[in-house]
Amino acid sequence: MELSRSYRNLIRTELIVPIVLLIIGTYGGLMQVLFRAGVLHYDPVLRLLIDTLGAVFGVEALRNIDLQSSIMYYWGLTLHGVLNAIVFTTFFAVAFGNAVVPYFLRLPLNTRVGWLSATVMLIGVGFTAFAMLSGQASVLYTFYPPLKAHPTFYLGAALLIVGSWIGAANWIPLYRRWRREHPGEKVPLAVMGMFATFIIWFIATLSVAVEVLVLLLPWSLGWTETVDVPLARALFWFFGHPLVYFWLLPAYVMYYTMLPKVAGGKLFSDAAGRLVFGLFILFSIPVGAHHQFSDPGIGTQWKLLHTALTYAVAIPSLITAFTLAASLEYAGRQRGGRGLFGWMTRLPYFDRQRWLFSYWIAGLFIFIFGGISGIVNASYNLNLAVHNTAWIPGHFHLTVGSPVLLAFLGMSLFLVAQLSGKEVRWKGVVVAMPYLWLIGVLIFSWGMMRGGLLGMPRRTYLGAGALSPDLQGTPLYRADWAPYAEIAMVGGIIMFVAMVLYFVAFFVTLFSRRVHEAALEFPVAEAYHDEPVRALNRLAPWVVAAVVLIVVSYTPVLIDVVRSSFKPAPAYVPEYNVPEKQLQQMTDQETQGVAKQR
Amino acid sequence: MERSERLVMGIGIAVMAVFFALVLLLATGFGVDVPGCITEMKPFEQDTVFQTAEKRYEMHVIARMWSYQMPPVEFPVGSTVDIYLTSGDVVHGFHIDRTNVNLMAVPGTVTYARVRFRTPGEYPIVCHEYCGIGHQQMVGVIRVVQ
């Protein structure tokens, strides 16, 4: 397949821009563990950033901003969440699809539409980044109203989503043409996986688009006075859990269609992969209420229904665990492994020629713990012990923050190097990075989860520990949490070092000399069991069933939410404890008084 | 599909079914349940606490930026307390240490939990939802005495 310059640059742009932003997000992560453990109370880089922005754009207000420790913490936390979990992942998924779909279908992508999609997404990120970096959107990545962000934050998020829709819509003509030209053939598994990813994304983001465009954007612009908070929360979480599978499924595409090849074996079962992607379409959306077990306004019977459906969505991951283990066992035996566990020792963990393997295997190992802790979260009343405690970030750094992150990082480097005609540099560092991350994240998450079981809250500036110059901490801080905040900090520092190594290797590779022609060649795994199962070759039946299930599971939730909501809420900004409207009517002196109360 | 695959799927489904049964047992047999949908009680403007029977109390709490509006309370050990919670401004959390009370305070709605305090001591309350830049100052306490 010929690679046009436009096509190569499209994918490179969609990969490199979010990696650059990820540097800011990663730095934000380091600051959080340091602030939580009380080692730092002041972030000089953020101060410098604000001052520079103020000088460049001539915004005097930015230079005078009073950067208290807590403002810095929640500011950095918003950047960390939005840049890492939304921007990086969405861009990567579109870029990966832009590579995978044309490659496996052997058909060229329409790069005009591709660039339209990328441009809309980039403008969106520009808006959102402006809102966050100028300190007008410290509402964290869940942006729960009635805490209000600058309108550009919501507008940017909406554009990012719409841009990703355009990107995925661009694959549909290729898919239809391929099916026309290959009647009766199985669609390549990787393509089916990418379509499953974006079908889930499309259905889920419809809900958050309604939340943002109908409820939040007009309210943020001052066109509407109040917002229905319970409704906004339900709409957000309709999106919030399928989002998890939007993150995960591109990694699953790699695990199923590429990992076995790189490991030196075959995919154990092609049909299992198809079944898994179908089950994800079916079960990943009607489960959002399991993020709202502690919320008012949703009947317990519906929360229980969402529990059952969440348990159902664990099944495809359990099938995946088996299929991947079987595929790796096959690879290990092909490589001369013997006995019950001997094959495990023969896998190419440190093989520099197969460096991608380390990004996948480290992530998969961590994912065992991520999956188990996720089942705890989904377990209805058991969730009461962990809801909104540090257990939760402990958990999701073992899912999106490890298998997804590592798979995306590895593939970003792989694609950028190939499309630029570069050879990956610093291969020893590149191979070692996932294992260093593994050590870091297991320490970090253990600290967070153990602290969480003692009631240590998530996303809270605790600000104390034995290493703190100010042992008192914030009022919310408790001494029995300190060791766990510190353990999490040690893990967080190791994770940060691993990321720095990755960034260095990435940019050294990017700026190295061109050594070959630009290429796009994925490792493609054959299937060991490749029997066609006709019923699993189509996506439409899964989508229809999913829509039915969504209507059944979400109609009562939405009815309950509306019934329980008595009055909508006015807007608040994070800095003041009076409604924004009241704030605008106050004199400067009165505002100072309110600010001092905090 | 191979026999081993069918077996794995069967085991997976069975394990999740057992977990679900345990969740139901915990909810019905042990009374550990999550908050439901309240439609008959409007969000209140005034916090209060009163006794409804011997060792039975009802308490109304309003979460605000960045403190809990609640009366100073001291319950005798063994008391059962019905807690009603609302928010006066933005979304807050309400997690009583060492108990299963873990609630979200959402403006415009009322939520509810029942708790029995079996041992004396101080029970710190933590706001575990980000509610603005003073979030880390938002604490409360319930004292349980002999």
Image: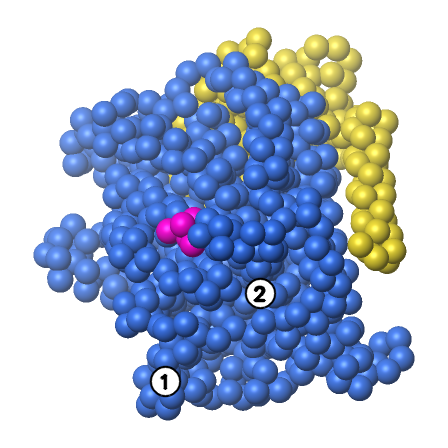
**Residue, x 36% and y 66% (percent of image)?**
A11
Q: Where is residue A258 in the image (x, y as percent from the top left)?
A: 60, 70
**Residue, x 46% and y 41% (percent of image)?**
A202
Mark 1 to mark 2: distance in Å?
Answer: 24 Å
Front-lying residue, A348 or A370:
A348
Front-lying residue, B113 or A163:
A163
Q: Position of residue A542 (x, y in %)?
A: 61, 39
Question: What colour has chain B?
Answer: yellow
Closer to the observer: label 1 or label 2?
Answer: 1
Q: Left or right: A42 with respect to A480?
A: left
**Residue, x 77% and y 81% (percent of image)?**
A334
Judged by its main secondary structure, the magenta piece is helix
**Residue type for callout 2:** Met
Q: In which quarter of the image is residue A143?
A: top left
Q: Left or right: A17 with respect to A178?
A: left
Question: What colour has chain A?
Answer: blue
| Span highlighted in magenta in the image | A170-174
**Residue type for callout 1:** Glu
Which label is found at residue A254? 2
The numbered mark, 1 or 2, whose residue comes first in the sequence reads 2
Q: Residue A16 in magenta? A: no
The answer to whether residue A172 is above or below residue A256 is above
Q: How crowded is mark 2: few (under 14 residues within 10 Å), some or many (20 or more)?
A: many
Chain letter for the residue marked with disc 2 in the picture = A
Disc 2 secondary structure class: helix
Question: Could you tell me if residue A442 is visible in this image?
Answer: no
| Residue underneath mark 1 | A517
The answer to whether residue A490 is above or below residue A206 is below
Q: Residues within 10 Å of mark 1 (few under 14, many from 20)?
A: few
